[in-house]
Amino acid sequence: MLKFEEEKTVLNLGSLKLLKEHKKAIYAFLWLFMGFVVGFSFWYIVLPDTTSFQAQIETYCLINKPSNFEGCVNQFGNVEETQTTSFVTSSERLFLIFANNIYVLIFTLIFSLIFGAGAIFILAWNASVIAAAIGIFTHSQLSAFPIGLIRYMIHGLPEIASYFIAALAGGIISVAIIKREVGTDSFWCTLQDSLNLIIFSVIILFIAAITEVFITPIFF
């Protein structure tokens, strides 16, 4: 599917038209992401311990409780301890979340430049981290899973959409390098479209971070 979508980039389309052209693929990746989240969340909840999700728990603690990282890892590594405490201000948490998501976006862009299907790995990893967060939020109770899923999908879906838009931008540049001579007017036009897509993805990512920090806690 990635190969098919990248072939479309040889057309001289504007950034918004490119998004419309690839909307079916974006929807497909969003549904794939949803499947990853549901699957990983299920196993996080039903498995007797969280050893298999140790890396994801560490990522969660690094973002949400950096000042008490070790305590957070120890706490959520044991499902019997479920009380959560805030250790950072909202503005600090916003910075940490946005910075972490920017790192993911950069890796997504690099992977899509080198190996298009590498974006799937980023998609799966981010889904596993969100799944661990859902498990922590629900206290590993399967009955609370729907609420946890809704809570994290409010900002999770825009995040994944931004990652795939960045992957699309990387694919556009990759195809342009392979099929066109670097330095031509057509190449610079393609590069401009890719840059517009990257900027758009960063804006979406920032909105998702604001939603996660300031809006979602109002309802959950």
Image: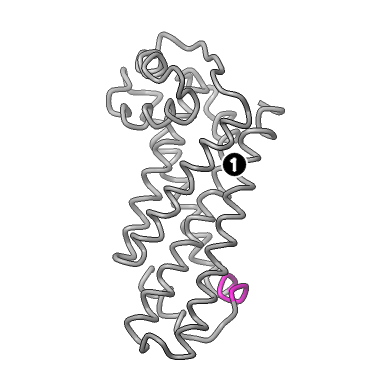
Q: Residue at x 36, y 60 (%)?
A: 110
- Give the crowd class for mark 1: few <14, some 14-19, many >=20 residues within 10 Å: many
Residue at the image point whose x is 56% and y is 23% from the top: 88
The number of numbered discs placed on residues in the rendered structure image is 1
**Quarter containing the C terminus:** top right
Image-based side of 31 in relation to 76, left or right: right
Which is more toward the observer, 12 or 206? 206
What is the x, y in percent for residue 66?
A: 45, 24
Q: Is residue 181 left or right of residue 153?
A: left
Q: Position of residue 157 (x, y in %)?
A: 56, 48
- Vertical position of residue 153 compared to residue 120: above or below: above
5 up-or-down from 183: above or below: above
121 is higher (above) or lower (below) than 111: above
Quadrant in which residue 14 is drawn: bottom right
For the point 56% across and 37% down, the residue is 95
Colouring style: one colour
| Residue at image location 44% in from the left, 40% down from the top | 37
Q: Is residue 117 magenta?
A: no
Whether residue 7 is situated above or below residue 97 in the rendered picture: below
Residue 43 relative to residue 134: left or right: left
**Residue at the disc numbered 1:** 209
Quadrant where the N terminus lies? bottom left
What amino acid type is highlighted by mark number 1?
Ala
Report the span colored magenta: 15-20
Secondary structure, mark 1, is: helix
- Residue 117 percent location from the top left of the image: 32, 62
Picture coordinates of residue 34 (x, y %)?
48, 46
